Image (tube, helix red, strand yellow):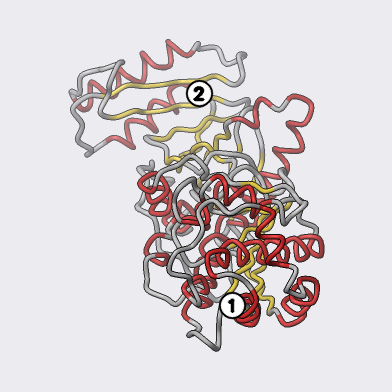
Amino acid sequence: MASVVIHYGELALKGSNRSWFLQTLMSNIRTSLSGLGASKVSSPVGRIVAEFEPESNWLEIAARLRCVPGISNFALARRVPADLNALADAVVEGVAGKDSKSFRVVARRADKRFPHPSPEIEREIGRRVQALTGWPVDLAAPDFVIRVQVMTNDAYVFLDWVPGSGGLPVGTGGKVLTLLSGGIDSPVAAWRLIRRGCRSHFVHFHSYPVLSNASQEKARELARVLTRFEMSSRLHLVAFAPIQQQVVVSTPPPLRIVIYRRMMLRIAEELARRVGAHALVTGDAVGQVASQTVDNMVVVGRAATLPMLRPLIGMDKEEITRDAERIGTYAISIRPDEDCCTLFTPRNPATRASLASVERAERSLDVAGLVAQAIDTMVVERFRFPPVDATMTPAPAPASISSS
């Protein structure tokens, strides 16, 4: 039997709520690993251990665990008896044939009844490794780190760990609704809230059939990627062209973008109430486009009564792009499409619209009727991960010790 040792970060500081956070994380791990032969997921002191058959697909296991919020890092490990000689033998077997410029052994005793303190474990294993390989010891900046964790009845040996998503387990932070465009920003905004434990549903506004359905296809692909981090989600596709047509014939051109955005928020808010979401999430960042000046964001935000969450508000495009590349949405987002915001866009949109002028212009619209029409005609699609008939691109294999 082989093992994956999983470490969590800040949820360890949750005090009396820690057990609930931990149980939620373990449930999410079980869901993410379904179909990969995980026989047991348990929580010995300070970590989580998932047990697998030796023939399990380690690349797929690593790829999925990297996406589970709440995991700080994890490692494919070898489980051995809680015995110093057994630990040393396992390490020596694992490093045989490997190359390194230097190394270090890091040992931790979860059970202090183990007769050998951590420094002694490190010295004995280090002596055995050096005798076999000739590698020098470097405690400050080792090229290779060997880790040993001693539990009550057994111990785990692993050569390296893989970074996880960090954050908090999905399901501990409430439910939000993200306005998902086909661009770079909004998927990153959704991911940042998911990583804080929120479950996000998505709403995408499109102008089909006036424009092509390319933006809908992008929204679906983005939702699939984001669902890897939260295991289940819903995508609501809202036909926005009829509303845009009404805005064009009834309101001054400079205010159209702001009015479009306010209508989107009203529709999203009604939808959020129906799905039980407690806040709206957007990819707004100050100065990105005309509708995202501080003045315009204030006017747009006044259209909603639910809290508006803007996790990217102070980020620049390079920072957002790095996150998009990290989570796998960037390549999808940069594909050309026909976003609804490109339809009926005025030549000179207002960058400092006043609330009074916008509200005056909106009096010519049947706001309630347009919102109801959008909700009644929207299409809802559900996503789950892992899907029964889909495979993920494997992540690079982390270093591990053979379980044979």
Is 178 or 42 nearer to us in this picture? Answer: 178
Number of on-image labels? 2
**Quadrant of the rendered structure where residue 37 is?**
bottom right
In the image: residue 55, left or right of residue 129 = right
357 lies above or below 22: below
Residue 87: x and y in percent read: 44, 27
Q: Residues within 10 Å of mark 2 (few under 14, many from 20)?
A: some
Q: Nearer the viewer, residue 138 or 290?
A: 290
User: Horizontal and vertical percent for residue 6?
Assistant: 54, 39
Q: Nearer the viewer, residue 171 or 202?
A: 202
Q: Which residue is tagged 2? A: 83
- The residue mark sitting in front, 2 or 1, is 1
- Front position in the image: 331 or 105: 331
Q: Is residue 249 left or right of residue 287?
A: right
Looking at the rendered structure, the kind of residue marked 1 is Val
Q: Secondary structure at mark 2?
A: loop
Disc number placed over residue 280 in the picture, else none? none
Q: Residue at x 49, y 42 (%)?
A: 164
Q: Give the residue at x 75% y 72%.
A: 371
In the rendered image, which residue does mark 1 sit on? 248
Disc 1 is placed on an element classified as helix
Indicate which disc, 2 or 1, sits on the residue closer to the N terminus.
2
* Residue at figure coordinates x 60%, y 14% from the top left: 112
Q: Amino acid at mark 2?
A: Asp
